[in-house]
Image: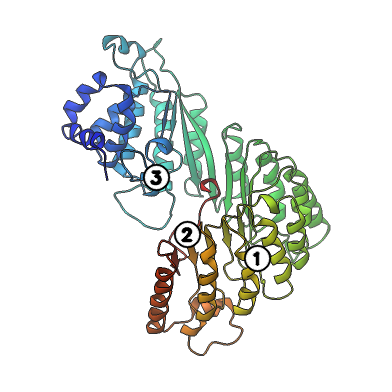
Amino acid sequence: MHTLVFLSTRQVLQCQSAACQALPLLPRELFPLLFKVAFMDKKTVVLRELVHTWPFPLLSFQQLLQECAHCSRALLQERPSTESMQAVILGLTARLHTPETEAGTQPLVRKHTLRVLDMTGLLDDGVEQDPGTMSMWDCTAAVARTCIAQQQGGTAEPGLAPVPVEVRVDLRVNRASYAFLREALRSSADSPLRLCCRDLRAEDLPMRNTVALLQLLDAGCLRRVDLRFNNLGLRGLSVIIPHVARFQHLASLRLHYVHGDSRQPSVDGEDNFRYFLAQMGRFTCLRELSMGSSLLSGRLDQLLSTLQSPLESLELAFCALLPEDLRFLARSPHAIHLKKLDLSGNDLSGSQLEPFQGLLQAAAATLLHLELTECQLADTQLLATLPVLTRCASLRYLGLYGNPLSMAGLKELLRDSVAQAELRTVVHPFPVDCYEGLPWPPPASVLLEASINEEKFARVEAELHQLLLASGRAHVLWTTDIYGRLAADYFSL
């Protein structure tokens, strides 16, 4: 449902030329809704003029494109329109090319007020390819081009320098876009359009390029560093980590493949690991740590003991954790603060089960998001864990995909989870009942790749749906879709 104010605003924007002429006469309180409607309906002429004459110091996508009192549509949950994004950038460029003294020719034009354009928080799914929308890669490139053009082309006449505008963005970079983005960051250092990176995601980037990029980022802005598919190992990471540690406000660090070269073990590897630990101790604001596919067997205590503050999100997928690692985590100060925990790919079916249950009990009061994909949890282990799992009263998301659970086990989970009033999403595996001729226990690779009996699974889905209806839990999503962007980002919890 839309309010009358929203519908009236939409009607006003039907004639874009008239709307632009009316902007100087409209109350500034209407500008936020005007921006959302123009962005949503691709009223690019109006959108450009809105940015050009924005009457507040801050223009924030996260504030303006969320669900609001006038419109329930949350545009940040959708990939942004290419036309709308380009209009915002054109409005920003026009603002910088217009001398400030022009404001005197139209006293009601307020274009000199904007100081910060915050474009962070845009959807980054990396999956769907729609030519009418912008991916995070596209947004990064568009902003970078603007920075370079602004520096190369100049702005206003001599003596009429524009007031600087800080543009906050989330940046994605790979080998192909590295040189381009590096030039943009260098250009923005001496430009009225100052690029400020909030979240950096670097994929498959050589070590020297990663270091060069980190050196160009503003230490006061960066919130997250995410290094993916770089396979740095301990040697490469020991070179990069001191450059990351200079970001004292960093709240999230996502690393992968932190282990030594098994062909060259020894002294160098241990020295690199100790150096890595020493650098990790420099972070004062870190709240999320992701160490996916890192060999941490028996070393989790060394890693977590170096941190100055308790973590709220910890991802240890495929880290070959041992029982003593889980016991340490359960006793550590981190456990009672955890909101998000990912133990995917760690075998929890044997001697790890009891310490895992102890960890759940320690985190029960705060845990919101629990990911246990491919943990070799069969019905026996799940049923033994249910009493402590259901104590996680605030849990919103439970991921169990890739575990050898039967329909009977899933039904038991569904019945017991009725007590978890906050639960909204359960990503469950295809029940083992739906496969033909499974080896036992079935390897995760078999569960992920083997064909299922579609007819049997259709009956399973129908039965689960009926059970949800009967328990008054129809609003809870039970799904096998692991690619549906259902897992929450730490900062959205």
Q: Residues within 10 Å of mark 1 (few under 14, many from 20)?
A: some
| Mark whose residue sits in front, 3 or 1 | 1
Q: Position of residue 72 (x, y in %)?
A: 33, 45
Q: Residues within 10 Å of mark 3 (few under 14, many from 20)?
A: some
Q: Secondary structure at mark 1?
A: helix
Residue at the spot 36% in from the left edge and 14% down from the top edge: 100
Residue farthest right in this picture: 267
Looking at the picture, tell me which residue is in the foreground, 306 or 459: 459
To which quarter of the image does residue 28 belong?
Answer: top left
In the drawing, what numbered circle is on residue 424? Answer: 2
Q: Is residue 150 visible?
A: yes
Residue at the spot 62% in from the left edge and 68% down from the top edge: 345
**Residue at which label 1 appears:** 388
To which quarter of the image does residue 44 belong?
Answer: top left
For residue 62, above or below residue 78: above
Looking at the picture, tell me which residue is in the foreground, 151 or 372: 372
Q: Secondary structure at mark 3?
A: helix
Left or right: where 136 falls relative to 34:
right
**Residue at which label 3 appears:** 76
In the drawing, what numbered circle is on residue 300? Answer: none
Q: Report the Cα–Cα distance between label 3 and label 2.
A: 20 Å
Residue at the spot 64% in from the left edge and 62% down from the top edge: 293
Q: Secondary structure at mark 2?
A: loop
For residue 323, above or below residue 286: below
